Amino acid sequence: MAGKKVVVVGHGPIGHAFIEKLAEREAGFEITVVCEEPRPAYNRVMLTQYFLDCDGDKHDQMKLSYWSEEDLKSKNVKLVYGRATSIDRDNKSVSYSKVSHGGSSVDEDTDSLQYDILVLCTGSFCFVPPTPGFVLPEKKNPQWPDDPASRPEGVFVYRTIEDLEALIAAAKNSKRAAVIGGGLLGLEAAKAVYDLEMESHVVEMAPYLMPTQLNQEGGKALERKISSLGIHVHSGAKIQEAVLDGGKVKGLKFIPNGETEPIVLD
């Protein structure tokens, strides 16, 4: 297998773990990893820690970073910043659009990689509910469901360093934030925006928080605890739309639990 070209698409935690194990074998593979984010892999599970560190300017030397670019080079791993766009199985090649350190794809600037072995570690993406106003229909990207360019100004997801940087920047000129979803990640996000000195609201469609992990009694107890911290909880809510004005979100329209008429949270 020595000399075989291994191309890994995706440099998230799983892609990095695979590369780490493969490099440990010292089997002579030519390893290339295609990374769509503008920095090498980092600990996404501990993403909320970034609000304390705010060290994105360190690029590959963040506290959350796994390996730096130099670490990858020392393991004979070639790092390519790009977003894979197609796979030619007959010719064994992967095409990709190049990504700058600013994180924006340039579709016209493309290239391709040859492989003997292709490993897909593309991970997941944030589910953006098909609620009016969450995505701009004319900018919807069917190949990239949480594409930042497809969302109105003021609508964020919670997955990458760039997502958090955008949220931190927006918080400087905002007073209130609504977090859609009262699961574990949603509660982390709600605490994060609270720490950014915004009025924090959690809007959950289920009748209580963390419905996947807790029963109703536990979820209601958690709701009381979260509320005591100063975070507003709206469980059992029926979300209708994000209210937009000129492509910018101005509020969230939903029907509170037990009510029949919607309210708008500005």
Image (cartoon, rainbow, N blue to C red):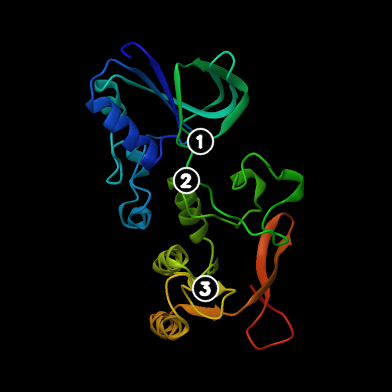
Q: Quadrant of the C terminus?
A: bottom right
Circle 3 crowding by C-alpha within 10 Å: few under 14, some 14–19, many from 20: many
Where is residue 28, by image quadrant?
A: top left
Asked if 64 appears above or below 184 in the picture, the reply is above
Disc with the residue nearer the chain's start (3 vs 2): 2
**155 on left or right of 185:** right
Which residue extends farthest front?
Answer: 1
Q: Which residue is mark 1?
A: 103
- The amino acid pointed to by label 3 is Val
Q: CA distance from mark 3 to mark 2?
A: 22 Å
Q: Which residue is mark 3?
A: 202
Q: Which residue is mark 2?
A: 162
User: Could you tell me residue 7's position as x and y percent?
Assistant: 43, 23
For image coordinates 43% across by 86% down, the residue present is 217
For image coordinates 50% across by 51% down, the residue present is 166
Q: CA distance from mark 3 to mark 1?
A: 29 Å
Tag 1 secondary structure: loop
For image coordinates 66% across by 53% down, the residue present is 152
- The amino acid pointed to by label 2 is Glu
Tag 3 secondary structure: strand
Circle 2 crowding by C-alpha within 10 Å: few under 14, some 14–19, many from 20: some
Asked if marks 2 and 1 touch (Cβ < 8 Å), the reply is: yes
Asked if 49 appears above or below 180 in the picture, the reply is above
Q: Quadrant of the N terminus?
A: top left
Disc with the residue nearer the chain's start (3 vs 1): 1
Please count the marks in the image: 3
User: Could you tell me residue 6's position as x and y percent?
Assistant: 40, 20
**194 on left or right of 126:** left
Tag 2 secondary structure: helix
